[in-house]
Amino acid sequence: MISDYFIDLGFKDVREGMYELFRFDEYGIPLYHYSWGDCYNPVFICHWGLYNLYLFKTQQQQIHLDNFIKAVKWLEISGVQDERGLCYEFKFPLTKYKIDFPWISAMGQGRAVSVLTRAYQLTQDKLYLDMAHQALQPFFIDASQGGVQSEIVKGYIWLEEYPCSPPSHVLNGFIISLMGLYDILVVDPRVKLKKLYDQLIQSLVHNLPRYDCGYWSYYNLYKYRDLANVDYHKYHILLLWKMYELTENKIFWEYSLKWERYLNRSINRILRHTTRIRQRLFKF
């Protein structure tokens, strides 16, 4: 049985004001308020749904269960079924990564799987399990072919939150995607999925040191590598601790504690800030 979602969904986004940027459509589905307008974001809708399921379990208020079901129903009607599987598309471009719309994200697909597997567990409706399996199919398809998989170094694959060229290799998006895969293995283990999961864990173990700059964590490995902002650095610490709990692999425990030590040193925050300024000025 799947337990509560792996991380406190209020930790980073909800308490930091993400919900203040939500608008709601006539059906009660959140749209995110961007500078150019209000858009559906599959990651945020799933995040909102999972958070409401958590609130229902802890507070037993019907409105929270209703909100979770709204997120599930949105996934039912909004997915695009094609040769890649069941895809949850983003309808806006990303200038930084030079991605035109529509596009899909491993993080979006993984979060959708986490919602759908919990919907299946709640209702025992096999439709949701079938949808979850279909939503995972882009994990097996290279980003250049419309999927979300890439090669981070020779012999190791990655799941791309932003499937661009060159690959961005975002750390938190990879781990969230991996958690969706973990969820479906709990409710419906299949050899093909377990093999992929093991490959991805090996890739994370092998490549995690590349996200350590010596005093802070990198958000991605895109071109000149972006240092994580403070919120994402905290998020990395939380995600790696959860990976340690799931796998008992000590490298995740070691890096979670190491990056927490980085966070607690004021000189490291200053170094991060000055490096970010230099990156923006000189694009390295």
Image (tube, rainbow, N blue to C red):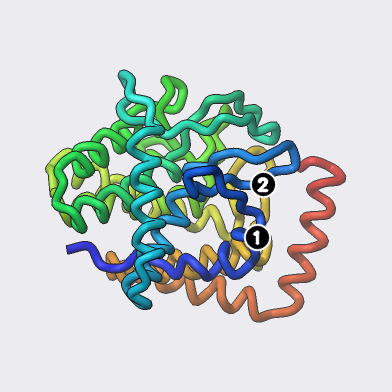
Residue occupying image coordinates x 65% and y 64%: 17
Estimate how packed mark 2 is, as few (under 14), some (14 to 19) or many (20 or more) residues with alpha carbons within 10 Å.
some
Say whether residue 58 is left or right of residue 258: left
Residue 110 drawn at (x, y percent): 37, 46
Residue occupying image coordinates x 20% and y 43%: 129
For the N terminus, the quadrant is: bottom left
State the SS at label 1: helix
Residue 20, label in figure: 1
228 and 161: which is toward the camera: 161
Disc 1 residue type?
Glu
Q: Residue furthest right?
A: 281
Residue 91 drawn at (x, y percent): 56, 30
- Quarter of the view holding residue 49: bottom left
121 and 94: which is toward the camera: 121
| Residue under label 2 | 33
State the SS at label 2: strand
Is residue 269 in sight in this rendering?
yes
Residue 247 drawn at (x, y percent): 28, 65
Residue occupying image coordinates x 43% and y 50%: 46
Residue 133 drawn at (x, y percent): 23, 38
Disc 2 residue type?
His
145 and 80: which is toward the camera: 80
